[in-house]
Amino acid sequence: MSEQNMRIWGQVEKTDTRFTKKAKVNGQDITSLSGTAMVMKATELFGPVGIGWGWKIIEERFDEGHEIFTGEGDKRACIGREIGHTVKIALWFMQDGQRGEIEQYGCTRYQYKTSYGMTTDGEAPKKSLTDAIKKALSMLGFSADVFLGLFDDQTYVDQLKEEQAIEQAADKDAEILRQKQERLDWLNSAVETIGKAVTSHELKMLNVKYIREATRRNEPTFIARITRAFEERQASLNAGKENAA
């Protein structure tokens, strides 16, 4: 029963990294999802919009926010209020002959003050609708890895990119070999750089740098090889000091 309940979720939880970008909202770094990409994914699963799935706008409104002032002291005056746009939708989909429905909201700032003065966003209704669709689809598990915060882990993102590069490659075997060679080239470069360290301090800094990166890449064999290169170079530097003495 659990597998049946998670069937949709399991098919759509991973996000195609090609359709994401980093953004800053209210001072926070977030992963922004492409609404069109989510619609495409839903279409792959349910069928064309309007046939296999779709949505209906239940409610749409403009809400007043806090007052906006300009000027200082005696010249301070209220010039209006911030206005936000809100839309409520019912997103429906067909699965095994049954119809499912999810209600969700989407919100966008419509009128607000910027450093350049008052502005209005004529695209607010469209943005609110896209927001509502994305939020409704997320309830089914679409791009769950983003909403669960997994995209905050660069290791997860890198591994996902590698997996998707293989899936999307015309020659999958060639892509696997390319990725393997890329990892080996990185390791060889790290070992070579460590072997050229001229001071103990430089050596320690390089070791920390490469061990941290190998850990992030989840490469335990690389960690062992880097550690061996560090110990070998450390022994060589110590021997040089003894000979100089």
Image (cartoon, helix red, strand yellow):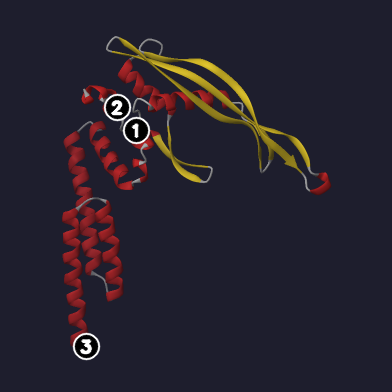
The span from disc 1 to disc 3 (Cα, nearest Å) is 61 Å
**Residue 42, label in figure:** none
* Residue 50 or residue 77, whichever sits in front: 77
Which SS class for mark 1?
helix
Name, please, the residue furthest toward the right.
74
Rendered image quadrant of residue 241: bottom left
Per the image, the residue denoted by label 2 is 9
Viewer-nearest of discs 2 and 3: 2
**Residue 144, label in figure:** 1
The span from disc 2 to disc 3 (Cα, nearest Å) is 66 Å
Name, please, the residue furthest toward the bottom.
245
Tell which circle, 1 or 3, labels the residue nearer the N-terminal end.
Answer: 1
Per the image, the residue denoted by label 3 is 244
Rendered image quadrant of residue 11: top left
Viewer-nearest of discs 1 and 3: 1
Q: What residue do we see at 30% from left, 33% from top?
A: 14
Q: What residue do we see at 22% from left, 53% from top?
A: 185
Which SS class for mark 3?
helix
Q: What residue do we see at 29% from left, 66% from top?
A: 206
Q: What residue do we see at 31% from left, 27% from top?
A: 12
- Quarter of the figure that contains the N terminus: top left
Q: Is residue 189 above or below residue 93?
A: below
Dots 1, 2 in contact, CB < 8 A: yes
Q: Is residue 187 above or below residue 72?
A: below
- Quarter of the figure that contains the C terminus: bottom left
